[in-house]
Image: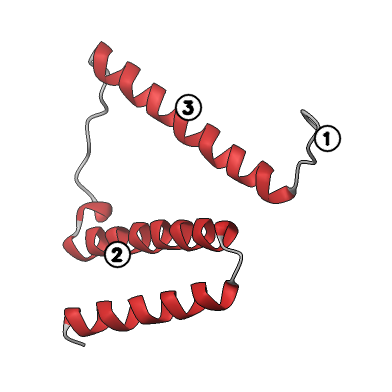
Amino acid sequence: MAFGSEISTRDLILFGGGLFLVVNSIVEIVETVRGETKERKPGMWNGFWLIIAQIGIIDIIFSLDSVFTAVGLSKHIEVMVAAIMLSVLIMMWVAGT
């Protein structure tokens, strides 16, 4: 219990994720300002298809994050499920699949 409210597991996960993003952002900014950027070595991770896979994984993660946030804010889960299904159908139609 903190500030008169109960803390749930969901709250801890959201707080941890936010803290992780803040710390990583600060580290990146400090490294950039100091000129300590890491030199990238050519290798397996620089292949075209691996880059496409990484972009796909990041898109999925951000999409799920948005879905979790929306479901957490919604009082009518059935409306959220219908909206997600409709948006997936529209994205598939626009993508031409």
The outermost residue toward the bottom is 97
Residue type, numbered disc 3: Val
- State the image quarter where residue 53 is shown: bottom left
Residue type, numbered disc 1: Met
From mark 3 to mark 1, how far is it between C-alphas?
A: 25 Å
- Camera-nearest residue between 34 and 3: 3
The outermost residue toward the front is 75
From mark 1 to mark 2, how far is it between C-alphas?
A: 41 Å
The outermost residue toward the top is 34
Residue 23 got which mark? Answer: 3
Q: Residue at x 22, y 39 (%)?
A: 41
Q: Residue at x 33, y 60 (%)?
A: 59
- State the image quarter where residue 88 is shown: bottom left
Q: Do the CB atoms of the residues marked 2 and 3 lie less than 8 Å apart?
A: no
Q: Residue at x 59, y 44 (%)?
A: 14
The relative height of residue 77 versus residue 46 in the rendered view (above or below) is: below
Q: Position of residue 15 (x, y in %)?
A: 60, 38
The relative height of residue 50 versus residue 28 in the rendered view (above or below) is: below
Q: Position of residue 85 (x, y in %)?
A: 42, 81
Q: Which residue is mark 1?
A: 1
Q: Position of residue 73 (x, y in %)?
A: 56, 56
Q: Which residue is mark 2?
A: 53
Q: Residue at x 44, y 58 (%)?
A: 66
Q: Do the CB atoms of the residues marked 1 and 2 lie less than 8 Å apart?
A: no
* Residue mark closest to the camera, 1 vs 2: 1
Could you tell which of marks 2 and 3 lies nearer the N-terminus? 3
Residue type, numbered disc 2: Ala
Q: Is the N terminus in the top left, top right, bottom left or bottom right quadrant?
A: top right
